[in-house]
Image (cartoon, grey):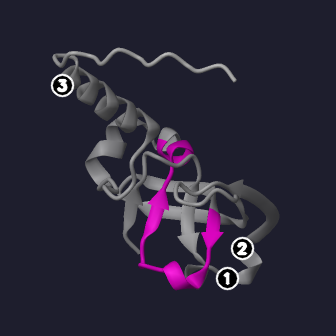
Amino acid sequence: MPILRDAGTTIDIVSRNRIRPEMLTGEHIWVQQPFNEAPICLPLEKVELKGKFGQVKTKAAVVCSQVDKGKYLLGNCTAALLGKDTECLIFPKVNVLQTRSQKRVQRSRKRKQFSCKIPFPKEPKLKK
């Protein structure tokens, strides 16, 4: 199964189709999705990853089988275990998600673009 690096998540993510029931740890994690206000509860499983980087044992959140794309999403904690050098050489990054730091950079660029415009005076608030 291909491994993708997701810099926007703390924990790894895998589909229910890719695990065996005995791999579940009995632990759960609450996850807040970017486009949904309500957090969801996901079970955790023990995972053993093998590749050019060696072998790593970690935990991953298990998502429903309907969203299975055949890929394992590697989060920040496991990437830290592997080290900075191997992270950028082995795993392609997921370009679908936008992190908070990326949003801040975009906002600052927009502010710089609009800073040349003349600001409108604020209207006074009416008291009732």
- The answer to whether the residue labelled 1 contacts the one labelled 2, judged by CB atoms less than 8 Å apart, is yes
Which of the two residues, 24 or 82, is positioned nearer the viewer here?
24
Q: Residue at x 53, y 47 (%)?
A: 78
Residue 17: in magenta span: no
Other residues around mark 3 within 10 Å, as few (<14) / some (14–19) / many (≥20): few
Q: Residue at x 50, y 16 (%)?
A: 124
Query: Label 3 is placed on what type of residue?
Result: Gln
Quadrant for the N terminus in the image: bottom left
Q: Secondary structure at mark 1?
A: loop
Residue 24: name its quadrant. bottom right
Residue with the mark numbered 2: 23
Q: Residue furthest right?
A: 26
Query: Label 1 is placed on what type of residue?
Result: Arg
The image position of residue 112, as x and y in percent, is 22, 20
Which stretch is magenta?
61-79
Mark carried by residue 20: 1
Q: Residue at x 64, y 63 (%)?
A: 61
Relative to 65, is 87 on the left or the right?
left
Q: Earlier in the sequence, mark 1 or mark 3?
A: 1
The image position of residue 4, as x and y in percent, is 38, 60
Compared to residue 77, the image places residue 65 above or below, namely: below
The image position of residue 58, as x and y in percent, is 62, 55
Other residues around mark 2 within 10 Å, as few (<14) / some (14–19) / many (≥20): few
Other residues around mark 1 within 10 Å, as few (<14) / some (14–19) / many (≥20): few
The image position of residue 59, as x and y in percent, is 65, 58
Q: Earlier in the sequence, mark 3 or mark 2?
A: 2
Q: Residue furthest front?
A: 128
Mark carried by residue 113: 3
- The answer to whether the residue labelled 1 contacts the one labelled 3, judged by CB atoms less than 8 Å apart, is no
